[in-house]
Amino acid sequence: MRRTMFVGSVVGVAMLAAMVGGAVAGARVPGEGAVKVQAVTGLDRLPVTGVEVGVMPCATGAVSATVTTGGDGTVTRSLPEGCYRVEVTAVPSGCQLADPTHVQVAVVPGVTPVAEFRFRCA
């Protein structure tokens, strides 16, 4: 039985990461970028934790990922290159969305667009 090793190539690193079920630090998958979601409240732009957001390709509208903001009010998700609609799907108790419920972003390698949502929280 012959085994093929991928050494020193981005494709090899990406394939290895896929086989072991994780990402390799510093490895970039060709045609992949990321989107950052940021949730803030007030003039001081305080972080809002626990905002649930759905991410879906513009063409299909089917949710491909659901993410939740952490303690710093942000979350970043790697995605294949393309157009995405980022939509708030759940708001933390005591808060209400101040802006529209969704934004559209273009994900391209090397650039991380920010989908920012503003809230009013008690």
Image (cartoon, rainbow, N blue to C red):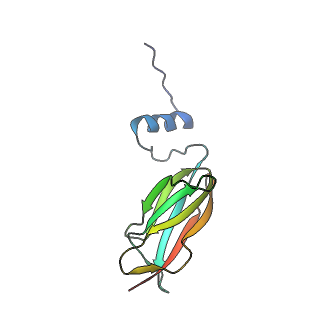
Q: Is residue 96 above or below residue 19?
A: below
Q: Position of residue 96 (x, y in %)?
A: 44, 80
Q: Is residue 9 visible?
A: no
- Residue at the far top in the pictured view: 1
Q: x, y percentage for residue 34?
A: 55, 55
Q: From the viewer's perspective, is residue 88 above or below residue 9?
A: below
Comparing 14 with 77, the one in front is 77
Nearer-the-camera pick, 26 or 106: 106
- At 45% from the left and 58% from the top, the residue drawn is 66
- Give residue 58's quadrant in the image: bottom right
Q: Position of residue 30 (x, y in %)?
A: 60, 43
Number of numbered discs present? 0
Q: Quadrant of the N terminus?
A: top left
Rendered residue at 41%/43% (across/down): 22
Rendered image quadrant of residue 24:
top left
Residue at horizontal 42%, vertical 66%? Answer: 69
Tell me the quarter of the image containing the C terminus: bottom left
Is 107 rendered above or below residue 31? below
Decide if residue 115 is on the left or right side of residue 22: right
Q: Position of residue 31 (x, y in %)?
A: 61, 45
Query: Can residue 104 be seen in the rendering of this structure?
Result: yes
